[in-house]
Image (tube, coloured by chain):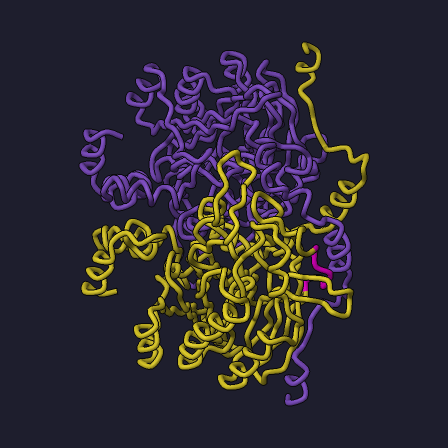
Chain colours: A purple, B yellow
Amino acid sequence: MDGAEKENELENGEDEGSICGYYSLHRLLFANLEPHLFQEVSRLLLGLNCGRPLETVVVTESAKALSSKHNFDLQAFRFQADKESLREPRVVRVGLIQISIVLPTTAPFSEQKTAIFHKLKRIIDAAGASGVNILCLQELWMMPFVFCTREKRWCEFAEPVDGKSTQFLQDLAQKYNMVIVSPILERDVNHGETIWNTAVIIGNRSNIIGKHRKVTLGNHVDFNESTYYMEGNTGHPVFETAYGKIAVNICYGRHHPLNWLAFGLNGAKIVFNPSATVGELSEPMCSIEARNAAIANSYFVGSINGVGTETFPNPFTSGDGKPQHADLGHFYGSSHFSAPDASCTPSLSRHRDGLLISDMDLKLCRQLKDKWGFRMTARYELYVEMLAHYLKPDFDPQVISDPLLHKNS
Amino acid sequence: MDGAEKENELENGEDEGSICGYYSLHRLLFANLEPHLFQEVSRLLLGLNCGRPLETVVVTESAKALSSKHNFDLQAFRFQADKESLREPRVVRVGLIQISIVLPTTAPFSEQKTAIFHKLKRIIDAAGASGVNILCLQELWMMPFVFCTREKRWCEFAEPVDGKSTQFLQDLAQKYNMVIVSPILERDVNHGETIWNTAVIIGNRSNIIGKHRKVTLGNHVDFNESTYYMEGNTGHPVFETAYGKIAVNICYGRHHPLNWLAFGLNGAKIVFNPSATVGELSEPMCSIEARNAAIANSYFVGSINGVGTETFPNPFTSGDGKPQHADLGHFYGSSHFSAPDASCTPSLSRHRDGLLISDMDLKLCRQLKDKWGFRMTARYELYVEMLAHYLKPDFDPQVISDPLLHKNS
């Protein structure tokens, strides 16, 4: 970020969803701390990659032009690994896209979807122009995040795995030789029209490699997921693509360390966490959960969140005693990458569309496994036994009581 | 922190281990950001407790006097819970102490230990004067952290569970009606003089409630734990004390989400993580792991780290190609509390002894379980099966390969 950008940012004032007029925490700190302080704060907040601050990558002029023209945030970084003697680096370029919806939720559904396609295409073009190999979109990118309404009519947005949204992305995957992870609302026609929350994995030759259905669902407050779809039945698959082994832990699944673990044990090098979540609910949690997963499982994590505020035609209540209202809150964007060495990128904007790119040398995963030995030291056998025991209705927790306590009570 | 303190801090200059002359990240940000920016940055970095910034607690004059006289950091906070209709608040006051060693590691061992006792007692007196109910000390607080040397003579520091260090603390537990968690190097005389890394739980009537032995060991770089002791054989006990159900996840165990999970399933409301770890190795990881554990398991976490740099008489190498040297690095203190609602306290100093106190309403644990439903939604049965499968030597990971990939390779 240079001085001119800094000034521009301040001139933007306090846009809805900004952080006191700044796009992100990182940019706020950059603009307000002396360089030597900013450097040390960054070390503590973002970690170091191979002992150094994370490098930025210069993006192509054409991508930069698209970002200026269509007003989306564009940032690029590089995670390096140490040099090895027997293995060459395996660098992949990975992209995350966060976008808001385009039309009001009252517009005809087909027009809402087409408008999202249209806007998304420009950002995918920028990813293509930047040579992105693997791209992941946010949860249910092809529709507003409607579950707070509890209205069933939005189910019309659901599509088969090979439906319109997939077809739209297949063309772009082919054009840009890009693997695309596409989280959609799935209609499973062959199983009685069941609805699922699903990520479709589209290969770089435009073929559908497979799908993964959200393992654990959040039903708290306004999320009401089980009103629309149930827990996924696809296990914890890792998809072996032309650019590496990837997996998808959809939204609420990030709260469950076991979920992250299973993708790791199946061999994922990059796990995406496409989300749609709002500030008041989860903002201080999101990067903690993602970074912890990357550290504990020695893989990269790409976290994507929607952005903007979506207003619905019929107000609804939120079980909090407050009056009815018509939106779920501000989706805070802030998409970012986390690495197995505890480093992470700054986040994308909190309130604008954006494309975050990172080169990552996947050799870093094994290097961290060798360094920390987490899999070797985990003693999984203890937990198979413990969990099996816990699952029994008459589970008896291991509690050691102070004998004096009971004597006197 | 008022203006005068702020100035004093800057006048301290760049003490070894400080953050550009500041005790902690929090204090650096406080001193250098405009108040409205600091407030928003704090919301993002420390979260909110019941929707508000964490409250500070005024400490007693006598505790403050001890902290000034003996030059240790003293901070106090309060985690609140929402009011309930059927349950009264259950507020406990919890303390964490971080201290450096006192004498050079070349001094007679008995003098080294006595000097630590002497210094620690002053800080425990401050905890007692503050009405702390449960106190936890850092890993192996009664000796230098010697394992980088790989020299066996330090094993002399090891003690039986009811040895001198325990006796020293039992007196203080009795005096202050305080539960004390005391992580020591244990010599298990009844099992062939085996050495363990053990936390002794001393009840508030000075009785020994029980012990827990470190579950997973870190053998990376200079830690060499298995050179001295092996993996604990005490399961994941929760200790029911006069002030609530507590557990201890010692040091390296914080890297293992399953470890944290097991203490949670056994019913812990507060899990302590006494550590001894250095900046270059783990600094950006430590609070991520603690906070993630608190969030995922709906309990409080108290993280304690040693402080200072310990120099040993005989230089040693570190398997990194660098010349021999005589210390492991700077133990970065920064002890802190994390809450189940994703809020956390600022950290204690990075380079000074310290006592961190927090009131915590343990009712917050259940409130967060009700809010997020993590236990209800976790689908543990999937993971019993998955882990049992993984443990088999012929484990076959769930991988879905792009068929085009293999056709062309």
Residues shaded magenta: B230-236
Q: In which quarter of the image is the C terminus of chain A?
A: bottom right
- Asked if residue B232 is among those painted magenta in the image, a careful observer would answer yes
Taking A108 as reference, is B370 left or right?
right
- Number of numbered discs visible in the structure rendering: 0
Q: Quadrant of the N terminus of chain A?
A: top left
Taking B59 as reference, is B393 left or right?
right
Residue positioned 40% across, 39% down in the render: A334
- Please state which of residues B38 and B52 is positioned toward the viewer in this rendering: B38
Taking B408 as reference, is A24 left or right?
left
Q: Where is residue B148 in the image (x, y as percent from the top left)?
A: 56, 50
- Please state which of residues A195 and A406 is positioned toward the viewer in this rendering: A406
- What is the chief secondary structure element of the magenta stretch? loop
Q: Position of residue A115 (x, y in %)?
A: 41, 25
- Please state which of residues A134 and A89 is positioned toward the viewer in this rendering: A89
- Asked if residue B21 is among those painted magenta in the image, a careful observer would answer no
Residue B315 in view, yes or no: yes
